[in-house]
Image (cartoon, rainbow, N blue to C red):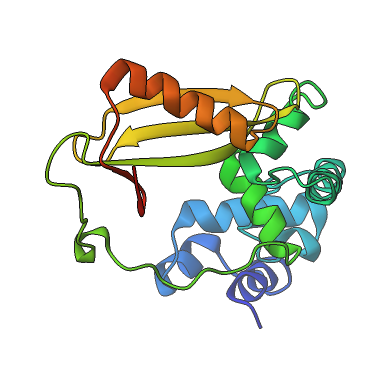
Amino acid sequence: MELGRYLVEAVVFGGQSPNELARSHPISRSWLFRLLARYREGGFEAIEPRSKKPKACPHQVRPELESAILELRRELSASGFDAGPQTILHHLAGRFDRLPSRAGVWRVLKRAGLITPEPHKRPKASYIRFEAELPNQLWQGDITLWTLADGAVVEIFNLIDDHSRLLLASDALPRFKAADVLQTFICAGDAYGLPESVGDHQI
């Protein structure tokens, strides 16, 4: 029998003194009188141990919002766009009063099995970076996809000096063709002089 129920029955049906019960048990008088008051208001059901679980969780994502997150994930992935938490939050803006955090969206995707666990990455300190010994000895270029505020996706071509890490050029187009890359390279060469090599290719 729960201690609370035993004490209430002892007072209500056994006629024992609450003060004496408080002295003979490891409880406070105030707790026992609160327990008796709850019993008088709602019977034995009112003195059952109450759950400490919060009635509302501020981190809980509402069902309709969770459905929208998963639907956006499917739509963006099917269209070949970035479908990460930040992009999903951007597309949800204006549709709901309150949005979860980026981590909240990530948890929704993870629960739905849409996040692929990554193996533990090596610490950055374990990497040794090899770089050109002199400026203009080697240029490196890469193209990155980026989603704009209106949902359009563009390609950004960055060209840097491998030694100094100087950004030689940064151009954005809906889609880069070989001629566009060459034009960016020529403009950078006019401004800084041609390098000895680009990536693994000698000039």
Q: Quadrant of the N terminus?
A: bottom right
Viewer-nearest residue: 144 or 55: 144
Residue at 50% of width from left, 69% of height from top?
21
* Residue 43 location (% of width, % of height): 81, 60
* Residue drawn where x is 65% and y is 35% of the image: 177
186 to 122, vertically: above or below:
above
> Where in the figure is residue 59, as x and y percent of width and height?
63, 45
> Which of the 4 image quarters holds residue 97?
top right
Tell me which corner region of the image, top left, top right, bottom left or bottom right, holds residue 48. Answer: bottom right
Q: Is residue 128 above or below residue 131?
A: below
Residue drawn where x is 41% and y is 71% of the image: 120
Front residue (pair 195, 7): 195
Quarter of the image where the C terminus is located: top left
Residue at the limit of the structure toward the left, as seen here: 133
x, y percent for residue 117: 57, 69
Q: Does residue 27 appear in the picture of this structure?
A: yes
**Left or right relative to 83: residue 146:** left
Residue 17: x and y in percent read 55, 64
Horizontal placement of 193 versus 61: left or right? left
In the picture, measured across the screen, residue 47 lies left or right of residue 197, that is right
Which residue occupies the extreme top position in the image?
191
Q: Nearer the viewer, residue 184 or 101?
A: 184
Asked if 121 appears above or below 159 in the picture, the reply is: below
Whether residue 59 is visible here, answered yes or no, is no
Q: How many marks?
A: 0
Q: Residue furthest bottom?
A: 1
In this view, 67 is above or below 135? below
* Residue at image point 65% right, 62% down: 115
